[in-house]
Amino acid sequence: MTTKPIAIIEHDPVSPAGTILDWLSEAGYPTEVIRPYDGDPLPEDLSEYAGMIMLGGGQSTRSDRKFEWRSQTIDLVQQAAAAQFPSLGLCLSSQVFAHALGGVVEKGEHGMEIGAMQAGRKDISYQDELFDTLPMAPDVIEFHGEVISELPPDAVHLMGGPLYENQAFRVGKNIWAMQFHIETTPEIFGGWIRDNKEALQRKGFDTDRLLERYAIVHPDLEEVWAPFIRKFAEIATGTDR
């Protein structure tokens, strides 16, 4: 039986799918990477795919600046939610999911959240089909200035954090979103720091410490998040590999 591919939507060339592609490939799940920033059209019909993973980027959910396909992205998320099409949004895309489904995205009142941190599971997450694979407080990678200040109506709050509370949620049965990154490599995260080094230092961040902390945490990311991504693929495709 041929398995439909999982659509991987990249919004920004500096925020690629990274290790997610490796994890899915190693588990035998086909993928199709869609890059609207490079002219790829967003899917009009999700039935061609088994599931969708939508990634981060430097854009704002609240603006079309460098995000000319924003309204189409919102429409796609609403289509997925209406069909309960297995979908996972990371960082920027978690904010797009929240906005598209009735939540509120705003500039974070506590400033930017950047670097290796831990997100804590809510009790209800132990009843979630996907999140039950996770430890109590897994390592995550943060890099954002806007935040989800209000979850969508009827969203299930799955994870919180010390700086911003709305770190992960689910809408319906199959629509998941996480404010953080899990797919980074040292090269990807290092590029974010280098590209924004002066601005980060002006805001009081120790960029050397951010890189040191990332290097410590990076080996643990695969142990925690590779099984999570494989579980998402199992749910999306109805297979167990």
Image (tube, rainbow, N blue to C red):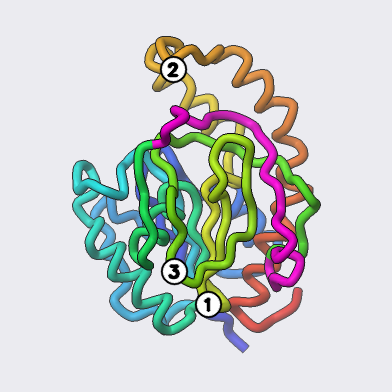
Cα distance in 3D space between marks 2 and 1:
37 Å
189 with respect to 42 (left or right): right
Determine which residue is flagged by label 1.
Answer: 172
The spot of residue 151 in percent (x, y) is 46, 59
Vertical comparison of 223 with 212: above or below: below
Of labels 3 and 1, earlier in sequence is 3
Task: Tell me the amino acid under the disc marked 1.
Answer: Gly
Q: Quadrant of residue 134?
A: bottom right
> Which is more foreground, mark 2 or mark 3?
3
Image position of 234 with respect to 91: above or below = below
Q: Residue at x 41, y 48 (%)?
A: 92
Q: Which residue is mark 3?
A: 153
Which mark is first along the chain, 3 or 2? 3
Specify the quadrant that holds the N terminus: bottom right
Q: Quadrant of residue 29?
A: bottom right
Disc 3 on helix, strand or loop? loop
Looking at the image, which is closer to me, 116 or 193? 116
Q: Amino acid at mark 2?
A: Leu
Q: Secondary structure at mark 1?
A: loop
Magenta stretch: give its range: 108-130
How far apart are the alpha carbons under marks 3 and 1? 11 Å
Q: Residues within 10 Å of mark 2 (few under 14, many from 20)?
A: some
Badge 3 local density, few (<14 within 10 Å), some, or many (20+)?
few
